[in-house]
Image: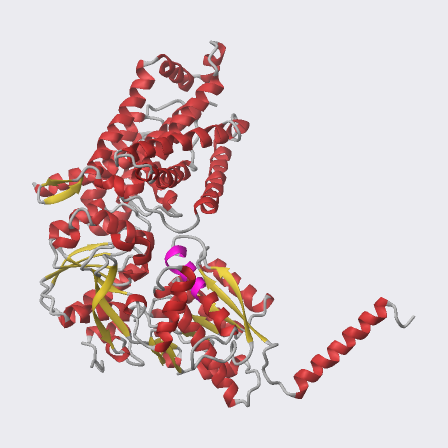
Amino acid sequence: MSGTPLKQALKGLMAGAALAAFGVGAAGQASAEETFKIGVVTFLSGQAAESFGVPAWDGGRLLIEKLNAGEVPAPYDTVGFGGMKIEAIPIDEAGGATKQVQEFRNLVQREQVDAVVGYVSSGDCLAVAPVADELKALTILYDCGTPRIFEDGQYEYAFRTAAHATMDNVSIARYLQARGVEIDSIAGLNQDYAWGHDSWRDFTASMGQLYPDADVVAELFPAFGAGQYGTEISALMRERADVVHSSNWGGDLQSFILQSMPRGLFQRSQVVFSAGDHVIPALGNNFPEGVILGARGAYGLMSPDTPLNNWWFETYQERYGVIPVQAPYRMAQALLGLKSAIEKAMAANGGARPTTDEIRMAMKGHEWEAPGGLIQMKLGNGHQAIQPTAIGTTAKDSDGNITVVDIERFAAECVNPPAGQNSVDWINAGFPGAQCE
Amino acid sequence: MYDVLTILVDGVVYASWLFIVALGLTLIFGVLRILNIAHGSMYAIGAYAAVTLAPLAPALGLPPVFSLLAMLIAALAVAIVLAPLMERGLLRLFYGRDEVLILLITYAVFLILEDVSKLIWGVNPYYLFEPRNLFGTVEIGDLFYVGYDLMLIALAAVCGLAVWLGLNKTKVGKIVLAVIHNPDVSACMGVNIARIYLLAFFVGVFLAALAGAFTAPLISVQPGISVSVIILSFAVVIIGGLGSIPGAAIGAVVVGIVRAAAVYELPEAEIFIVYLVMAIVLVFRPEGLFQRTQARKI
């Protein structure tokens, strides 16, 4: 009876268990058979999906595929995370902060992920960060903009691997000054929620420092998802402001462009979009020329000419047929930051699989090279990144395709506050400690 | 002077868009006593249908003006498919039940249609550039307006007039009015109530889809466009009086002009000014501006 299927199965199980125990006990070395499980949370439905969530997930899964195959250029040419294959579980960020806290708990407690990478919405970041500490779960916030996370709070297990929104608007103001744009009046159209108000506040405060004589002639905050901007466009055109600022994104930005372009707003004022690069693939050559454009980093058409960035840009474009914009760049820099922190922790502990606390300590104050430039975790007690950025002006190339010219690059220390300083206070004090080349 | 003129023009352009949607909503309520939350979905699907059909005109080598015809056909197609499906297939099963229950059913349909739209068209935006260039630009004061936007005023006027004439000057319209006043007596007189309900629902859905189709060239058509329009339409019909066509027209103009004035003179009030007006109207005339006070049936 020794050969019965049941007994054979039991023998097999016991042998497998013994081997597994031996394997763990004998070495503890990370290997290609091991996996590092991450939850990737981003908008897969809803208004932020097309602009941010879906391109971010597209970029994330492409990079994970390439990392697992060991096909990413040096210094990221080791397989996966330190030899461990990356397994990603995508989660839709739609549904609000309460739902996201539940999803976060599910990922950590039920799916037992090793880390969570995610969150476009500032509200979700603010809600999830304290839960990350409560559950002692390594959490990489890859995109959300509000400076409040590490300026108002202090977390041990949450890290943000991209600069916060202050950089976007300080750099726009610095660009206007660097290009010698004469400005007596400014106007703004921003979405009526925290992102729009914070962006406008940072922009006007920066302009107050760099153009102290410029007057604010219109401040418009249409509802998020308003769709119709006819009246606002009339109001902006009537004021004839030298500069019109907007941090709108997604469908709101696209509708604003479509409605204002034939009415001549772009001829009457210098329009600046602080985060507008992501609508270029959607609008293509219908995107207006002469617009000053930010991408929330040196991304996409304003990305630097480095081997890593060239590989990333071409790989993404080849796979999806469109240029990578800010969202995939930000996802890539989060994943590469996590990879380099894990490998740094492994190097410190003799090559064994690092614990969450070892990775966390390695991530604190960490620096790594990303496609958009050097990322440095310098703010928020080593939990908040700063990065270089670039601003440019849209134009048509010789083939009639929209591109970005007159690109100005800004060092991270020039457009981000120094450690320990609140963003708004830093701007209002005249950017003390800013290091601009 | 320019300010007043600009507020008027902007307000009326905005009102015309809103009126077409609200007209369908108020018609359906007037005849069927249904507050149709799924009306916003009909608007969105009309926009999606337009961005799908309208590009066929230039692709077939037809003159650009045919894209307007394609948008009209798109709206008609939406009404032909969705109106019988929703009214005959679902809503009629609940006639005579609590109005709140039917309201919740239309909300469920709204949620379902949101996901159906995503299944069919995905989450990426669609654009329809060509029709907006058909009418050039017009200079009013020192501002340029797109001729297409001003054309929407004419479209809204045609829709309003057609529905008003249809109801008041045709035999079918008289029958519809009879059904509005008393469906039971109308049925006793030999009126096919089911057919009248379907007709009213069809026209209502068509108007929502038409508004969506003709708004498509102004916006990026993507998930979520149905939400804000239904909230604003409710505000319009509540201000004007539920079920009243002149009320919808006045409500739309009030909302459009008050909102435009707020954008110019008090931008921080833009978001809530519409609802403030609605609240004021409800305080003094809970039945809306154009609805007669009715005795409550017990």
The answer to which quarter of the image holds residue A267 is bottom left
Q: Nearer the viewer, residue A36 or A139?
A: A36
Q: Classify the position of the N terminus of chain A by image quarter.
A: bottom right
A336 left or right of A267? right
Which residue occupies 46% across, 44% down?
B120
A129 left or right of B244? right
Q: Nearer the viewer, residue A425 or A246?
A: A246
Find residue A228 and report its horizontal and vertical position in percent: 27, 45
Q: Label the magenta part by its dominant secondary structure.
A: helix
Find residue B279 and report its horizontal and vertical position in percent: 31, 39
Q: Magenta residues, as a range?
A: A49-59
Q: Classify the position of the C terminus of chain A by image quarter.
A: bottom left
Asked if residue A423 is positioned above or below residue B205 in the image, the reply reads below
Find residue B26 and report its horizontal and vertical position in percent: 36, 29
The answer to which quarter of the image holds residue A196 is bottom left
Asked if residue A385 is positioned above or below residue B85 in the image, the reply reads below
Which residue occupies 38% across, 17% down?
B177
